[in-house]
Image: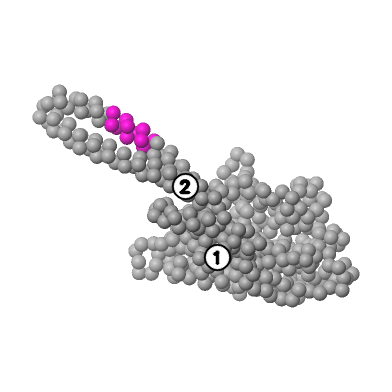
């Protein structure tokens, strides 16, 4: 979240940045109104407390002089003042809670380098890699390939769990496992990330630390009767490892990775990507998370993007990188690159990784700090994250790009060691 004082002192800037995101600025006006009310209440309480302190001294002197007759009405008056202070304090608590709700709903300020625009149509392509494959036949979408090979079963999954689930079988399930191991091996052994296997359920406080709550409550799954939520991404537990903690400058940048299943209700996506593996309630992903000093977080975003890109390069899957425009930017992000892989069966690019710099937006919510060398005062770190990669979308990209005329699917060379029989 943004610092309350920063919003107050830079309210025109915050309003301008919200407009860049194509947001209605009513939220900023609401902030200004509630903040003014809070400051007025604080001023009233302060004046009443000063009055009470001053009169209390007068009462003490009158009592010391034995003049109880003059002291008594002042005592009655101060009881009324105390009651008034208590009522104002109660109102102040309610107003501060309202103000915090508003502050938690204000998005991060987009970086000045973020392109202007309203939605994904205004995103800017910054790079392409690889050659789009040429086929001597009409390429099929992955759901047709998977169903014909008997490795993707959407019908049985629907019987088990409802819509937006898939049952992977045989080659598909083995390919999924191979991809997870390949991703983790690359990121830990070459890119220097430390691997974790975090809990797949977290508390509301943990969800709040990374910005999923309260704004995106409808996109999440919650356990009934428990303060436990299914994670939508490993970003949530990995980032919160250092919640309310202080790192040393020498430790930065900290680089973590994890494989987890991810759970999303896909609220508001009714009718979108109803076929195939693009938009599922449950999917697998390997996530990359970084903690960096403010001076280096911009460079670390570029490194993060390169780490994610290398996965696709080694798999020899063509892709492009786009810089998200302000209107398409995520709530917590100051700057985001999307990597979109080519899907010949659908004749389009689709997102397979999103790499973002959150600056200190998440760190302020979660209380993640670092202490610069030689300084006593700590500072907020900058947090970053990216997909390295989404497993299901990589799997479907392989099915579509490596499909053969006879209906089979060729295996990328880099994955061959993961299919070597060892037993």
The residue labelled by disc 2 is 29
Q: Quadrant of the C terminus?
A: bottom right
Whether 84 is among the magenta residues is: yes
Disc 1 or disc 2, which is closer to the eye? 2
| Image coordinates for residue 399, horizontal then vertical, percent | 79, 66
Q: What residue span does the magenta drawing correspond to? A: 80-90
Residue 396, above or below 206:
below
- Say what secondary structure mark 2 lies in: helix
**Count of numbered circles in the view:** 2
Whether 81 is among the magenta residues is: yes
What residue is shown at x 76% (from left), y 74% (from top)? 132
| Image coordinates for residue 112, horizontal then vertical, percent | 50, 65
- Point out the tag, 1 or 2, that comes first from the N-terminus: 2
Q: Left or right: 204 with respect to 267?
A: left
Alpha carbon distance from label 1 to label 2: 25 Å
Residue 404, above or below 233:
below
| Image coordinates for residue 161, horizontal then vertical, percent | 75, 47
């Amino acid at each position: 979240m943004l610092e309350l004082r920063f919003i107050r002192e830079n309210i025109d800037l915050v309003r301008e940045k919200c407009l860049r995101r194509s947001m209605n600025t009513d939220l900023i006006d609401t902030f200004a109104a509630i903040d003014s009310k809070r400051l007025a209440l604080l001023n009233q309480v302060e004046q009443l407390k000063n009055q009470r302190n001053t009169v209390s001294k007068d009462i003490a002197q009158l009592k010391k002089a034995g003049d109880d007759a003059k002291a008594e009405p002042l005592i009655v008056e101060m009881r009324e003042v105390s009651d008034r202070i208590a009522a104002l304090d109660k109102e102040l608590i309610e107003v501060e809670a309202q103000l915090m709700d508003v502050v938690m709903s204000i998005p991060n300020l987009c970086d000045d380098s973020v392109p202007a625009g309203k939605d994904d149509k205004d995103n800017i392509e910054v790079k392409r890699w690889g050659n789009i494959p040429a086929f001597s036949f009409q390429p099929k979408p992955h759901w047709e390939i998977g169903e014909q090979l008997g490795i993707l079963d959407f019908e049985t999954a629907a019987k088990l769990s409802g819509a937006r689930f898939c049952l992977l079988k045989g080659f598909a399930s083995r390919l999924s496992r191979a991809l997870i191991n390949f991703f983790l091996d690359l990121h830990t052994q070459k890119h220097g990330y430390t691997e974790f296997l975090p809990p797949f359920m977290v508390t509301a406080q943990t969800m709040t630390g990374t910005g999923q709550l309260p704004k995106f409550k409808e996109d999440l799954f919650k356990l009934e009767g428990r303060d436990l939520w299914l994670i939508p991404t490993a970003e949530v537990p990995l980032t919160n490892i250092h919640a309310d903690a202080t790192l040393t400058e020498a430790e930065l940048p900290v680089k973590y990775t994890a494989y987890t299943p991810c759970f999303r209700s896909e609220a508001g996506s009714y009718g979108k990507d109803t076929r195939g593996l693009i938009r599922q309630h449950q999917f697998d992903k390997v996530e990359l998370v970084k903690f960096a000093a403010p001076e280096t977080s911009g460079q670390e975003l570029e490194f993060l993007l390169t780490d994610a890109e290398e996965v696709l390069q080694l798999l020899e899957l063509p892709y492009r990188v786009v810089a998200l425009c302000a209107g398409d930017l995520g709530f917590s992000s100051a700057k985001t690159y999307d990597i979109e892989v080519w899907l010949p069966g659908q004749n389009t690019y689709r997102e397979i990784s999103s790499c973002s710099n959150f600056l200190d937006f998440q760190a302020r919510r979660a209380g993640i700090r670092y202490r610069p060398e030689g300084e006593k005062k700590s500072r907020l770190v900058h947090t970053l994250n990216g997909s390295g990669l989404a497993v299901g979308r990589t799997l479907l990209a392989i099915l579509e790009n490596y499909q053969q005329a006879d209906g089979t699917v060729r295996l990328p060379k880099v994955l061959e060691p993961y299919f070597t029989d060892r037993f």
